[in-house]
Amino acid sequence: MRFIARRGVFYLITAWAAVTINFVLPRVMPGDPVQSLINRYQGQISADAVASLYTLFGLDEQQSIWQQYVEYWGRLFTGDLGLSFTFFPTPVSEVIAQALPWTVGLVGVASVLSFVLGTLGGVAIGWRRGTWADGLLPVTAFLSAVPYFWLGLIAIMVLAVTWPVFPSSGGYDGGLVPSLDPEFIGSALQHAVLPAATIVISSVAGWVLGMRNMMVTVSSEDYVTVAQAKGLSERRVMFGYAARNAVLPQVSGFALSLGFIVSGTLVMEMVFSYPGVGYMLFQATGGQDYPLMQGIFLVITLAVLVANLCADIAYAVLDPRTRQGAGV
């Protein structure tokens, strides 16, 4: 599979570039992150402790930038992303590990659900173009233009304030401890309803419009006409011939959306104060927590690269022309 091997090499080079940029950016940004940490403790730290902090965070001025770079790679290979300033002295990897399941669980399920519903809806509307189903397009176009936070604020006002059906913020009730206890799971699901519904309603319209337009284009192709002339069932022609080819651009977009699942929906998590990676990134930015920002950016970048690689593999499986063009 030379195609996949070449793509794998490309993504490895991209990952190296991303890690290098991730290393350089905090070192060229204005301000001193260690000094900001010292200020939080009102300067009650000895000179020896200050020097140890610089070494601990990989910012030892006695080391060359190359030595710091090599040590940074060494720490990455052992899973050491440094210590968080905001949650000092908790390691960054532990902080991200606590927030990641919330984001992946919420945004992941909502993204998959919106993709499936939007794609199936786009197939149906595009196949039956010119019928009453096209009357739904203005509604989907409106929803696709509505930002997450606006829908989120409306959902909070209607379903959490006016009619207090669902909680307005947080990931679970304050008196509970995260566990697999049925009471905690029920509370977490209840808190996730409004954020998930916000994501699904805002994003499903884009999938409907994209799939509908591709179905309209593909439906006029010769191979679809030939399949219909053979007397194949409408369902088989719609899904086996038209939808299979029309879905290819959707696969690429869906793979990218899966990659950005790790980052969460920052504004949505801020609106609902949801304890995910996006909200944590907001906290890290406000607190100049460079190690935590580095760790989150690194996880997001690797997730996007893996998602793109999966999209390339899916393309190679769904479209034989990709493999032929790559010399597989």
Image (spheres, rainbow, N blue to C red):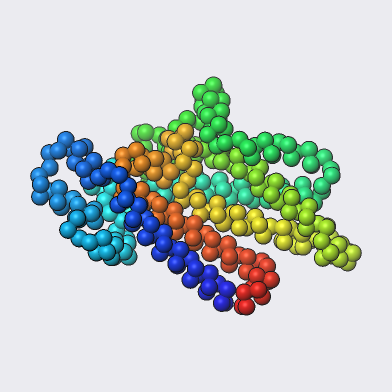
Q: Quadrant of the N terminus?
A: bottom right
Residue 218 versus residue 50: which sits nearer the camera? 50
- Give the residue displayed 72% in from the left and 58% down from the top: 246
Q: Give the left or right position of residue 148, taking residue 242 as reference.
A: left
- Give the residue displayed 24% in from the left and 64% down from the top: 67
Q: Quadrant of residue 298?
A: bottom left
Residue 200 versus residue 46: which sits nearer the camera? 46
Q: Give the left or right position of residue 97, taking residue 328 as reference.
A: left
Residue 287 versus residue 192: which sits nearer the camera? 287
Can the viewer see residue 165 in this picture? no
Residue 55 versus residue 138: which sits nearer the camera? 55
- Give the residue displayed 39% in from the left and 40% down from the top: 282
Q: Quadrant of residue 135?
A: top right
- Report the number of numbered marks: 0
Can the viewer see residue 64 in this picture? yes
In the displayed structure, 104 sits above or below 76; it is above
Residue 292 location in percent, x, y? Answer: 33, 48
Q: Quadrant of the C terminus?
A: bottom right
Residue 81 location in percent, x, y? Answer: 31, 56
Residue 45 location in percent, x, y? Answer: 12, 42
Residue 240 location in percent, x, y? Answer: 75, 62
- Give the residue displayed 74% in from the left and 50% down from the top: 213
